Amino acid sequence: MNETDIHSKLAGAVVSGVGALDESAKDPFVVVDPGSLVPAVTFLKNDADCRMEMLNCVTAVEREDCIEVVYHLSSVTHRHSLTLKTRVERPAGGTHESWIPEVPSVAALYASADWHEREQWDLLGVRFTDHPDHRRILLPEEWIGHPLRKDYVYPHEHGGMPLDLDAVPLYERDEATPSEPAAPRPSGTPLVQPPNPNSDRPDAGGVAPADSDGDLRSIKPGSNDGGGH
Amino acid sequence: MGVLNNSLPDIGPVRAVDSAIGWGRKSSIWPMTFGIACCAIEMMAVYAATFDLDRFGAGVPRATPRQSDLIIVPGTVNAKMAVRVKRLYDQMSEPRYVIAMGACVCGGGPYVKWGYNTVKGVHKIIPVDIFVPGCPPRPEALMDGILKLREKVGRNQVFARQAQTAADMDGRYAAAK
Amino acid sequence: MEALEMYTVDPNDDVYTEELKLNLGPQHPSTHGVLRVELKVDGEIITASRCDIGYLHRCAEKIGENVTYLQFTPYTDRMDYLASMNNNLAWSLTVEKLLGVEAPERAQWIRVIVAELNRIASHLIAFGTYGIDIGANTPFFYAFRERESIMALLERPSGARMLYNYVHPGGVAHDIEDGWLEDVLAFCDEFEMRWKEYNTLLSHNAIFIGRTANIGVIPKDMALDYGLTGPVLRASGVSWDLRRDVPYLAPYDDLEFDVPVGEGTHGTLGDCWDRYWVRMREMMESIRIIRQACPRVPAGPFMDKAMNRMYKTPLKPEPGEAYMRCENPRGELGFYVVAEGGTSPIRCRTRAPSFCNLSVLDALLPGTMIADGVAIIGSLDIVLGEVDR
C-alpha cells in the first residue's frame, strides 16, 4: 500500500484527531492530535494491512510556534512506511526552561521507542507521559537544560570538569589555590623548599586563574554564519 | 633514598644507574587498553601486525591502570567521560605518562565550537607528555609519538637528580647556618 | 533462563550468594569503546542489567544545526568511524533528496564500490575484535592485515586513511585514478582466499561454536519490536535489506546478490553464532557486488555540475524535510533533516543503527553468565561513536 491507502484506513479506524495527508512533502506525513497518537499507532501496528512492525525513529523538532514529534514507522511484511507527526503548540513566552511539552509515550507498543523517547527528553526536553523509565540517556543525570533547544546556553563546566577552551587545567588550578593550608613545618627542615626533583614538568606556580566571569569563553553558540571555521 | 643521598657524593656512578633504569623503563612501556573513539581504531592498527608496536616494547596493552605506565587517550573526552579519565589516571602508579592522541584530545578538534559537553583537550584534566595531532593521526604519527616518549623516559634521571638536589640542599642548609 | 532458575537468590536457604553489583566499563577491553553496563550478579549469573551510554556524546546533532550541509559530511565520518563511506553516502543521499538532485551515473557506481569495500573493512573489525572478546587473539591480526589493504585502496581516491569524507552531496569528491579498479579486483581475489582462512581459524572452531551457539538468542518478534536492523535482524531470520528492498542507489537494482539470513546452524535461530555468520557471509556478498560493479563503472562526470558551486557558496535547500535510510554494516542508518530555507537545517536527526541494536542488550543479559554477556555485546557489533553521536 502507499501512504494514501494507509492514511484512508487510519482515518476510518481512528475516530478523531487524524489530520489530512500532506502529499506535497518528500515523505508524505499525517498529523495526529497528541490525544489520538496512541490509538493511531496501535491501529497501524495491529491492522493486518498496515502491519507497521518497526518504529524506526522518534524525533522531536523545535519550530517557531510548536514542538513536533515525528514517528517513522515501517513494515517489513508489506515493505511500506509512514511518517506520523504530532504537535504541541508553544505557549506565549515558552522558553526551554519554562516550557516542557508533553506527548503520550508509545514505549508500551514498541520497545524501540523506549530509548528514542529518552533521548528526545534528554536533548529537547519533551516529556513522554507514561514512559516506564523517564531518565536522561546521553547526558549525565544532573545536567541542566536540554541542549538542542534553540535558546540553550552553553555551560562553563560540569561536575568540576572544565568545558571552556581557555579554562585553566585542573592540576594547575590546584597548585595555584591550595585547598587546605600547609601543615606546620617540623623543626630541622630547610627553610627553602626545593622544587620536586622528580618532576619533568615546568613548575606551574604563579599561574593565576583568569577572571571566571566576564568574557572567559571565546566560543559562544553564535548565530549561524554559514560556515567558515 | 636516604642512603643514596648521604653516601654517594660522586654523581658519576649514579648516572650509570640512572641510564640503566631509564633504558629498562623506556624499553617496556606498557600502555593501557583504553579506547574512546575513532582514534582507538588507529591505535589498534598500531598494535596489529602491519605496524607492530611490540618492536619497541610497548605492545603489551594492560587491561588495568594499575599495571600500566602509559595512558594513550584516543578520542574525544566529554564531561561524563572526563571524570573517568581522571580517575583512571589517578589509579596509575608513578612513573606514568600520558599521550594525547588526536585533535579532540589535543584541543577540542572538530567539536571545539559547538560541543556543549566536550572537554577542549585532555590537558585540562590530566597533564600530558606527548601530543599527537591528526584526525585521526596516522599510525606512523602515533608511533612517532611513542618514540618521542621513549626518548623522554630514557632521559629521566631519577637518582642523579635526587643526589644533586640533596647536595644542593646541604650546601644551602650550610649557608643558612 | 534455566541457569537463573537454578541459582535464584533465596535468603531463607542455608547457603545463598549475596547479590553483587558490578560495573562493566566504561574502560573495559570488551565493551567496544566506552559502554558502561551496570550488572547485578548472583555468582556468575547476571540477574539484572542496565546500560549507561553517553560517554562519547559529541553533540553531532547540535553541530548539524549550525554548520552547512557540506560541512556536516566530515562529522558523519566520526559517527560510525568504522564505516565512514557508508555514513557519507547516507548523508549525501539525504541532502540530495532534500534538493531533488541525483548524482551522475559514474559517481553512483563508485559509491557502490567504496561503500561495499568499507562494509568489508567494518565486518573485518567485527570479526577480529569478536575473536578477542571470546578469547582468540589470532583472528585480530589476520583481520587487520586485510583491513590495511582496504584502507590503502580507499586512501587513493579519498586521501584519508580512515575518515574519508569522500562521498559528497552530488557525487564524490574526487575521481578515481586509472588502474584503481584493477587493484580492487585483485584485492577481491586475494580476499576470497583469506576468507576461507578465517573460517578455519574461527568460524568452525569447536570452542568458538561452544561459546556462541545458543547464546543470546533474539527471536524474530523481539528483533522487530526493538527496531533491530542489519545483520542482527537478519540473523533472527528476517530477510530485510534496504539495498534490495528499498534500493537507495540505482546500481543496486542491476546487481545480483543474496541477502544472508540466519539459519540456526549450530543452535537456535538468532544466537550469537548466527549473527557472526551472517556478517561473514555478507563479506562475500560484498565481494560479489564489487566484482560485478568494477567493470561497469561508466565514463562521465563524477560530480554534478550544478552542485559544484556548493564549494563556494553554501547550499540553500527549499523548506522541507527528508528522511533517508541506508543499509550500513550495522543496520539502517537514517538521517532526518528539516530545512527552513537557511544554509543549515533546523533539525538534523540521526537514526543510528547501533543505538537501536544496543537497546536490546538489557533484555538479553539477565539469566546469562558474565562471560556470555561479553559474547553477546560483541555479537551486536556496536560502535559507541554512533550510539552516542
Image: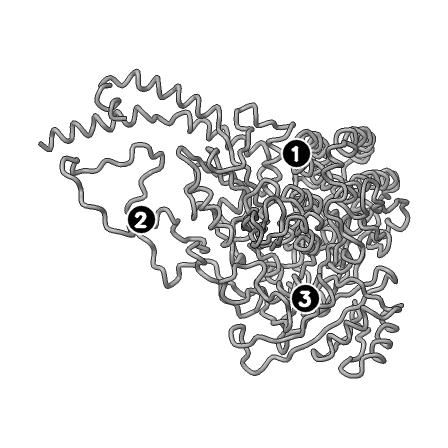
The residue carrying pointer 1 sits among few (fewer than 14), some (14 to 19) or many (20 or more) residues within 10 Å by Cα, namely few
Q: Is residue C296 left or right of residue B66?
A: right
For label 2, the SS is: loop
Quarter assignment of residue C95: bottom right
Label 3 amino acid? Thr
Q: Chain of mark 2?
A: A
Label 1 amino acid? Gly
Identify the residue at horizontal 45%, vertical 58% (top origin): A158
Q: For residue A207, which numbered disc appears in the image?
A: 2
Q: Is residue B114 left or right of residue A51?
A: left
Q: Provide the residue designation for mark 3.
A: A59
Distance from the alpha carbon under mark 1 to that under mark 3: 40 Å
Q: For residue C135, which numbered disc appears in the image?
A: 1
- Residue C264 image position (x, y, % from top left): 83, 44
Q: Chain of mark 3?
A: A
Please indicate, yes or no, whether residue C330 appears anywhere in the rendered image.
yes
- Residue C388 image position (x, y, % from top left): 61, 54
